[in-house]
Image: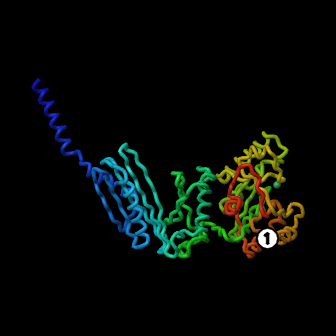
């Protein structure tokens, strides 16, 4: 009995002692939380002001960068003050906490990107995080830190990068946030927490501010200049065991791309040529499995023609083709309903399959007044077409055209409201 009582008293003492020695004060808990929040975000080697203030009426901890650019520093001060001001606008307890920190990027001497990250903890344990981008560009007037062309291009590529996880139309209407980072422009959206992507500077090369341009080599990715004329070459009915590679040799020589609409049952003739085209940045689309007329085919037949071809092409490139060129240009309502792909027409028909004569193809293309925005139809099956392309590719480049893929032409042109099952025509 006595023994039991001793244990009991001993236990009470232990509990009492531990609560005195181990229970940290609310102030030190807050300081620990602040430090670990600051450590979540990297800003090594950057001068910063650090403030940690515990109070029973709400606590605030922030790290504010000192960028040594007066305009940016004062803009950041205004924002930090605003966040703290909002926080204290309503009555607070010691459970209310506001943390603010930043990440900073300096892709070149004239450009700085700062992202301010704030996290507010409320009494019920809820945490709300906000991120705000601040861009500084020494050579730009305020409000134009990211030039309009660069914004437009970055948004186009961001929507393309996010298209498998987010609805492109919803993103187009959402409010974007952009930030200069070390590797590219980071695009995020106000109402889509997980829609974040960095568009590499290499892809944006022609729209970059001069100071940044001089730091980037465009050849690590094919960059498109949105202010230059664009034309898309397309080759149907392949792959061909010899000519597909010969076409690719020409494109490669001029750092150009094209779109190949392959017939499913031909894929095994030259799968490595398809892979080579894909790796070069060319686009691979479907042209049905057996070159069937998809307007007059039954729904079952259409479905099997499309599915089999998609599987074949995906096995080679690893990617599901998003484009379908219907054989003979024939499109009916069943195809529109069934197709999960964009139906792609053309605007310049060279009739290369009919005349099988290089000069007639060359003359046909050169006769057009303007080819800006045009899609030129050719076929992978003829030596005469290869010969024509050998002359046409350098001729187009000399005449200030960029050779782009169909998706690039659609994204960068006016037709960037992609809708599945819609038959797209091009040109004027
Ligand atoms: Ni065809």
Q: Quadrant of the N terminus?
A: top left
**Element under disc 1:** loop
Nearest the camera: 135 or 87? Answer: 87
Looking at the image, which residue is at 35% across and 62% down? Answer: 63
Residue farthest toward the left in the current orientation of the protein: 2
Residue 57 position within the rendered picture, expressed as x and y whole percent measured from the top left = 30, 51
Q: Is residue 7 left or right of residue 284?
A: left
Query: How many tags in the picture?
Result: 1
Q: In percent of the image, x 85 and y 69: which residue is there?
A: 364
* 200 sits to left or right of 113: right
- Camera-side residue of 110 and 76: 76
Q: Is residue 189 positioned above or below 300 on the image?
A: below
| Figure colour scheme | rainbow
The spot of residue 223 in percent (x, y) is: 63, 68
User: Which residue is pictured at 80% across the width and 45% down the height?
Assistant: 333
Kindly give the residue lying farthest to the top in the view shown: 1
User: Is 386 situated above or below 97?
Assistant: below
Q: Which residue is mark 1?
A: 370
Classify the position of the C terminus by image quarter.
bottom right
Q: Quick check: can you spot residue 266? A: no
User: Compared to 243, does 119 lie above or below?
Assistant: above
Nearest the viewer among 245 and 338 is 338
Q: Is residue 92 left or right of residue 207?
A: left
Q: Estimate the x, y position of residue 115 in percent, counting from the top left.
A: 45, 62
Residue in view at x 80 percent, y 66 percent: 386
Q: Is residue 288 visible?
A: yes
State the residue in front, 233 or 140: 140
Q: Quadrant of residue 8?
A: top left
Q: State left or right for residue 372 relative to residue 194.
A: right
As drawn, 235 above or below 7: below
Q: Ligand 1: give its quadrant.
A: bottom right
């Amino acid at each position: 009995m006595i023994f039991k009582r001793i244990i009991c008293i001993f236990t009470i003492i232990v509990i009492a002692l531990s609560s005195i020695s181990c229970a940290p004060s609310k102030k030190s808990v807050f300081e620990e939380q602040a430090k670990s929040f600051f450590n979540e975000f990297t800003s090594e080697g950057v001068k910063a002001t650090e403030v940690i203030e515990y109070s029973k009426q709400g606590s605030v901890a922030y790290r504010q960068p000192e960028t040594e650019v007066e305009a940016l520093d004062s803009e950041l001060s205004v924002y930090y003050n605003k966040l703290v001001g909002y926080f204290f606008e309503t009555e607070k307890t010691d459970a209310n906490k506001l943390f603010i920190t930043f990440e900073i990027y300096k892709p070149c001497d004239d450009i700085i990107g700062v992202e301010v990250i704030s996290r507010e903890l409320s009494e019920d344990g809820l945490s709300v995080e906000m991120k705000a981008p601040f861009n500084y560009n020494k050579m730009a007037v305020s409000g134009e830190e990211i030039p309009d062309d660069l914004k437009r291009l970055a948004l186009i590529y961001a929507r393309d990068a996010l298209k498998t996880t987010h609805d492109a139309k919803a993103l187009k209407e959402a409010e974007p946030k952009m930030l200069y980072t070390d590797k590219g422009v980071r695009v995020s959206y106000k109402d889509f927490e997980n829609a974040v992507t960095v568009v590499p500077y290499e892809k944006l090369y022609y729209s970059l501010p001069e100071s940044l341009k001089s730091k980037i080599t465009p050849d690590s990715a094919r960059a498109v200049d949105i202010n230059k004329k664009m034309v898309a070459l397309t080759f149907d009915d392949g792959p061909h065991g010899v000519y597909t590679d010969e076409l690719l040799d020409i494109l490669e020589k001029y750092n150009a791309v094209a779109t190949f609409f392959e017939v499913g049952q031909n894929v095994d003739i030259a799968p490595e040529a398809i892979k080579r085209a894909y790796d070069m940045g060319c686009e691979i689309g479907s042209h049905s499995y057996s070159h069937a007329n998809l307007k007059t085919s039954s729904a079952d037949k259409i479905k099997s023609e499309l599915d089999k071809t998609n599987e074949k092409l995906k096995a080679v490139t690893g990617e599901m083709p998003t484009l379908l060129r219907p054989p003979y240009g024939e499109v009916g309502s069943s195809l529109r309903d069934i197709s999960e792909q964009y139906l792609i027409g053309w605007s310049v028909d060279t009739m290369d399959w009919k005349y099988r004569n290089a000069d007639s193809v060359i003359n046909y293309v050169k006769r057009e007044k303007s080819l800006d925005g045009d899609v030129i139809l050719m076929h992978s099956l003829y030596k005469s077409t290869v010969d024509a392309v050998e002359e046409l590719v350098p001729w187009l480049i000399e005449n200030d055209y960029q050779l782009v893929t169909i998706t690039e032409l659609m994204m960068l042109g006016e037709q960037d409201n992609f809708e599945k099952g819609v038959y797209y025509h091009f040109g004027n």
